[in-house]
Image (cartoon, rainbow, N blue to C red):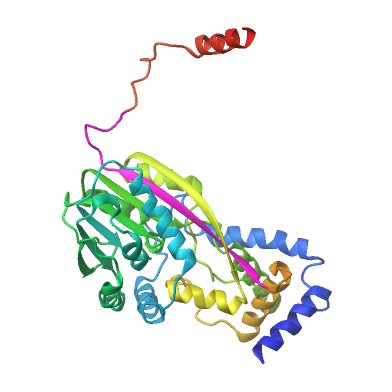
Amino acid sequence: MAVSAARVFAGEWASGKHYRLFPSPAAAITAFSFAIAGLASFCTEADGVLSSRVKIFDRDLKRKHRDRAAWLMGGKNDFVDSVAENLLDRLEDCKKTFSTALCLGGSSEAIRRLIRGRGGIEKLIMMDMSLDMVKHLKNTEQNYVSNNLETLYMVGDEEFLPIKENSLELLVSCLGLHWTNDLPGAMIQCRLALKPDGLFLAAILGGETLKELRMACTIAQLEREGGISPRMSPLAQVRDAGNLLTRAGFALPGVDVDEYTVRYDSALELIEHLRTMGETNALLQRSNILKRDTALATAAVYESMFAAEDGKIPATFQVIYMTGWKEHPSQQKAKSRGSATISFEDIQSHFRSNEVN
């Protein structure tokens, strides 16, 4: 019944019969852009970095989401595996080996399964804020390729890292840190836990994630409720990632971005996928009630605006990869200002002479 109602609304949306707020889909998209700006602005400072003075996320609720995800995890998750593979590939670019490593929350199961001896890790500590998730990781340990890897499990919160300073050589976080209220503070704790010349690897969801769902949800709420409430979590922008690494005190910071497009049979399948990853809404200022007709309208708008010819709907996931090192005297350092021996004019004249010849 719900599916048929959604299809009826989709037809009405496409024909414009019941879409009175906006004269056209283009006008609706314009209104959406202003609405999303309002959703994101309440949690940022002037420089765009998430404020450490404001609590944005309900960490207790996020722990419950992680508990539920532990029970829902089953088959292979291609998106999560791709992110974990790309993150771990950075270890193959390092000649250095890391005997002791910590894996923080998020998609830690994929990290443990796909690490396959990379980085020369001898001891791996798996940490999650959810006890049920830690139990799930421990119960599935026999499914992993061990490679003589000693694995320890612990319950802990990324916001209050229970790790001794200068005790780790590698710290990996895959799709977990974007749920912390104080992201710079959490990254500072990560740096303190690393030994000198230790490596920090992280993947977080970026601001373009689920842009299609944001648009559909906002338009549906405006249509059915006459206003909007926060349904999607604010996420860091790409331009902020380098600032976050520098602010946390990491040396040799590196940032790159990937966008993944995952195709689903319906909006319901997308929501179920988010549940299995523990990525559903945990805002403190969230509305606890989503009206049935608003949910159906969201699914219908999503399908009518973004569905492909085969009926599948796309969902965009923007992933920001961050790399940073704890300072060490052996690391490369920038030369002091004024120490250059060749001017740009000399370089330019050199290339001009080569062109003439």
Q: Is residue 106 visible?
A: no
Q: Residue at x 29, y 75 (%)?
A: 140
Residue 23, by quadrant, is bottom right
The N terminus lies in quadrant: bottom right
Left/right placement of residue 352 relative to residue 279 reads right
The C terminus lies in quadrant: top right
Image height check: is 251 above or below 66? above
Check if residue 318 falls in the magenta segment.
Answer: yes
Q: Residue at x 17, y 49 (%)?
A: 166
Q: Is residue 333 visible?
A: yes
Q: Nearer the viewer, residue 210 or 286?
A: 210
Q: Position of residue 172 (x, y in %)?
A: 31, 56
Residue 96, by quadrant, is top left
Q: Position of residue 232 (x, y in %)?
A: 53, 68
> Which span is picked out in magenta?
312-333
Residue 20, by quadrant, is bottom right
Q: Position of residue 2 (x, y in %)?
A: 65, 89
Q: Position of residue 124 (x, y in %)?
A: 22, 60
Q: Nearer the viewer, residue 35 or 62?
A: 62
Q: Residue at x 33, y 44 (%)?
A: 324
